[in-house]
Image (cartoon, rainbow, N blue to C red):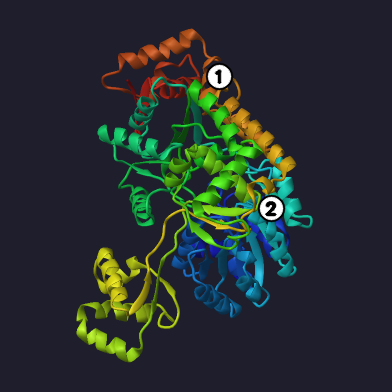
Amino acid sequence: MISPLEILQQYWKHAAFRPLQEEIIQAVLKGKDCIALLPTGGGKSVCYQIPGILLPGVSLVISPLIALMKDQVDALNKKGITAVAIHSGMQKEEVKQVLLEATESAYQFIYCSPERLESPLFNEYLTHIPFSLLIIDEAHCISQWGYDFRPSYCRITETKGKLGSIPVIAVTASATPLVLTDIQIQLGLHEPSIFKQSFLRPNISYSCFEPESKINKILDILQKVQGSSIVYCNSRKQCKKIAEAILLQGISADFYHAGLNQLLREQKQLSWIQNKTRVMVCTNAFGMGIDKPDVRTVIHHDIPDCLENYYQEAGRAGRDEKRAYAVLLWQQKDLLELAQNGEKKFPPIPIIKEVYQAIADFLQIAVGNGEGIYYDFDFNNFITLFKLDPLLVVNVLRILEQEGHIQFNEQIFLPTQVNFCTDTESLDQFEIMYPSLEPLIKALLRTYAGIFYNRTSVYEQSLARICRTEIATISVQLKQLHTHGIIEYLPKKETPQIHFLLNRAPAEFLHIHQDHYLERKKLHKQRIATITQYAGLSKTCRSNFIGQYFGDNSTIVCGVCDICLNNKITDISAANFNQIELILKANSSSGIDIAVLISETKNISPKKVWAVLNFLQAEDKISITEEKRIFWL
C-alpha cells in the first residue's frame, strides 16, 4: 500500500511533512476521531486530504465558505484528485446529479456547506454514498463561545450520526482552550486524539506602532521591506483610499473587498498572486484559502476586534518560512472606537427587534410568511431608507443568524441559469437563420448535460473560451437567444441575500436566547480587552502572549518581535551601542559588511552586535541588503 509520505511527494511535491501532519494522518487512518489545532499556514488541508485519498470511498468536507471550497476543489482537481463542491449557486438537478454520481464513488471528496446537510435532497442520498471520513473545517464555528459562531454547524452532529462509525477530523487555526473543549462536546467525539501545533512562528516579527500618520508609516514599511504585502482595513472606502495613496508613491497596489463583482475580485487576486500587484489593500474578505508563500509584510491599518482574527490574518505572512513582518498600527481613538463597536456588535435586545421589524417591512414579508425564501437585500438602500447605522445592521443580521432566524450572505454568487425552451426541429431552423449564434448554441449543448430539459448553471468565462470570443459577447448572445424564445435566461446574481429559515415572527415575540446572548457579549468584551492589551504591550514577548492566549504554554520568547528587540538592547551597555552606531554612521555612504563590522567590534559579542542591528533595523535607522551590507539611513 502506498504510504502517506509517497502521496505527499507525488501530489504536493513536498519532501517531508510539517510538524504533526504525519501523526494526525496516521491517527485518522487508524479510525480515530481527531481535533487538529494548526495555526494559519500550518498545512491543515493536507492532514485530511491525504487520508481521504488513501481511504476507500468518499470523504465529506464541511466548510463555511463557498470561495474556500471552490479553491480547494480546483486545487485537488488540478492534481488529478476527484473533488466537487455542493453550494448555494447550484440548481436542484445539478446537486442531484453530483449525489447520484457520488453513490458510485465518482468523487474522492465532496465539499459542502453545513446548511446543505439539512436539505431533503442531500439526506435522501446521504446513506447511499460510501462515506469513509467526515471532515469539519473551521471547526471553531460550532462553538457559540468562539469569535465566529455559526448555528448551522451545531446541526453537523445529526449528519454525523447518520454516517455510521467513520472517523471524524475537526480542524481549526484559532481556538482557545474553552472553544477547543466545546468543539469536542458539540461534535460528540469519543476520546479524540487532540493535536496542537505550537503557535510560535519564529520567522515572523510582530510589532505594534502608534504613529501620528498611519499612511506615512505604511509607506515607510513598504519602502524598507521589499516584496509582496497585504494591508488590512476595516472599511471598503479606506481600502480604495489607501491603495491610491500607495500608488502615488510608485508602488504597485490594488484594493479588494466583498462589494466588488466576482470576476473583478478573481482578476485582482490573480494579479497579486502572480506578483503583478505588489500590495493588496483589503478588508478581511481577502486571504481565506490563499496559500501565497512569499508575503513579506502583513500590515493592519485598523485594529481587529479579537486576537483570533489578528493572528489568522497576520499568519498569512512568511509561509515560505523566510523572515516576514506582521505590523499592527493603532491610535488612541481606535481603541475607543473598538469599545464602542463592541456595544454595537451586541446591541440591546429591543434594538434587535426594531431592526428585524425594519427588515421585514423593507422586504414586505407578512407575519407567518417567508420560511425557505431567498430575498435580494439592497443593503445601502435599506440603511438609507430606515436611517440606520451600517455596522449596527450588519451585527443584527449576524445575531439573527446565530439565533437561527435567517442566513445572510454578503458574497452570495448565483451563476447564470439557462435551459432551452424550444424543440430540436425549431432549434435547427433557428441556427440556419442566425448562424452567428450557432457556436454558442453548440457550446451550451455539448458542455452542459441535460440543459435541453433542465435549468442549468452556465459560466460565461468557460463559454467565451470555447467559442473563442469575449465574455461580454457571450452575455449579449445569451440575451439574444432569450429574446428569440430559444432559451430561458436568468443572469447571474451577486447581490446580498437574506434567506429566512423561519417564518417572519411579530417583532415583539422574536425569540432571542437571552442568557447565551449575554454570555457571548461578555466574551466579546474580553476579546476586545485582549487585543487592546496586545497592542499596548511593553515588556511581554508578542509571540509568547499570543501562544498563551491560545493555551500554548510551550512558546518561548521569539527574540524577533519589537518587544524582544527592545529587551535585548537593555542588556547592552550604552558604550557598546554607541560604538556600533558610530562605525555605521562613519560608513553611511558606502555601507559596511556585517562580517567587517563584527571584526571591528571584537570587544562585543556577535550576538550583541546582531541585537543592536535588529533594533536599528526595526527603528528604520539602517537597512541591510541581501548581500549582508549595512547602510545608515
Q: Taking 104 as reference, is 253 left or right?
A: left
Q: Residue 35 carries which label?
A: 2
- Up the image or down, 54 lies above or below 590; here it is below
Report the quarter where the N terminus lies. bottom right
Q: x, y (%) of residue 516?
A: 72, 42
- Up the image or down, 78 lies above or below 37; here it is below
Report the quarter where the C terminus lies. top left
Q: Which of 276 and 627 is in front in this view?
A: 276
Give the CA distance from mark 2 to mark 1.
37 Å
Q: Residue furthest bottom?
A: 425
Label 1: how many residues lie within 10 Å, few (<14), some (14-19) or many (20+)?
A: some
Q: Which of 352 and 230 is in front in this view?
A: 352
Q: Which mark is residue 567?
A: 1
Residue at 51%, 76% in the rendered image:
93
Mark toward the viewer: 2 or 1:
2
In this view of the protein, can residue 213 be seen by the observer? yes
Q: Taking 246 as reference, is 203 left or right?
A: right
Name the kind of residue labelled 1 in the image: Asn
Q: Which of 106 and 604 is in front in this view?
A: 106
Label 2 residue SS: strand
Label 2: how many residues lie within 10 Å, few (<14), some (14-19) or many (20+)?
A: many
Q: x, y (%) of residue 395?
A: 56, 42
Q: Which of 243 and 132 is in front in this view?
A: 243
- Up the image or down, 418 lies above or below 509; here it is below
Name the kind of residue labelled 2 in the image: Ile
Label 1 residue SS: helix
